[in-house]
Image (spheres, helix red, strand yellow):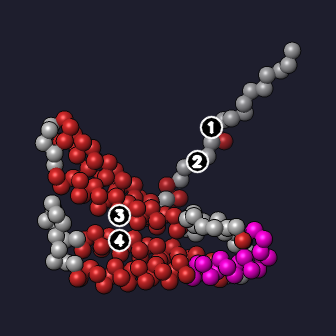
Amino acid sequence: MTDCKTSNNTEDEQPSISLADYKFEDWLAFLLFWALAITVFSQFLSRYVLSSPLGWTEELARYQLVCLGFLGSCIGIRHNSHIFVMLFHRWMPITWSQLVYKIIAVCNLLILILLAYFAWTIIPLIHIHKMASLDVSVSVLYGAIFGSLLIMIIRSGQQVLVRFSNRLVSSTKNYE
């Protein structure tokens, strides 16, 4: 007969969850996600159970989803987990690969700055336009997008600083 080995797993070996690992954009996305869930649930409840749909919930859910997508991009930039092509980096010398990563980080930062500039300039232009079913200006949505872009600029700036420091940095490092 063979001896059966038992698992040595104890509760001490379980990974601990620290709330300090979560940043501002994580908490904001968490709250917005649950606000979106409540909005969609109220839309479902009013439409299919009460047979009296709340028209404003569709538009609000759409705008909440847009904001949640931009907050998700903030988190993706912080974790450096956006999709990119790494085919040629495998065969490049490490110094060339680091140079390419630096160029990509700077280009990402410049594009985000340009997008933030466009969002900032469009906010006063669309201030007079209201949402279709809510008496709120559409510029509120662009303000939220602008805020998300600012967070992305900060996180991308952190990546650029780390890339240009003289340390050997992996392409998948988290910047927190």
Q: Amino acid at mark 4?
A: Ile
Find disc 2 in the rendering and name its residue: 16
Q: Residues within 10 Å of mark 4 (few under 14, many from 20)?
A: many
Q: Which mark is residue 114?
A: none
Q: Amino acid at mark 2?
A: Ser
Q: Is residue 167 visible?
A: no
Quarter of the picture holding the C terminus? bottom right
Q: Is residue 85 left or right of residue 78?
A: right
Considering the whole magenta stretch, tell me its main secondary structure: helix
Residue at point 18%, 42% (across, down): 46
Q: Which mark is residue 67?
A: 3
**Residues at marks 4 and 3, CA–CA distance in whole angstroms:** 6 Å
Q: Is residue 30 left or right of residue 98?
A: left
Query: Residue 146: percent from the left, percent from the top?
Result: 35, 75
Check the image and report above or below for 70 versus 100. Answer: above
Find disc 1 in the rendering and name its residue: 11
Instruction: Check whether the beta carbons of the residues at disc 4 and disc 3 lie within 8 A of each other.
Output: yes
| Helix, strand or loop at mark 3 | helix
Q: Residues within 10 Å of mark 3 (few under 14, many from 20)?
A: many
Query: Residue 121: percent from the left, percent from the top?
Result: 30, 84
Residue 94 position by quadrant: bottom right
Find disc 4 in the rendering and name its residue: 145
Residue 71 position by quadrant: bottom left
- Identify the magenta region: 90-106
**Residues at marks 2 and 4, CA–CA distance in whole angstroms:** 33 Å
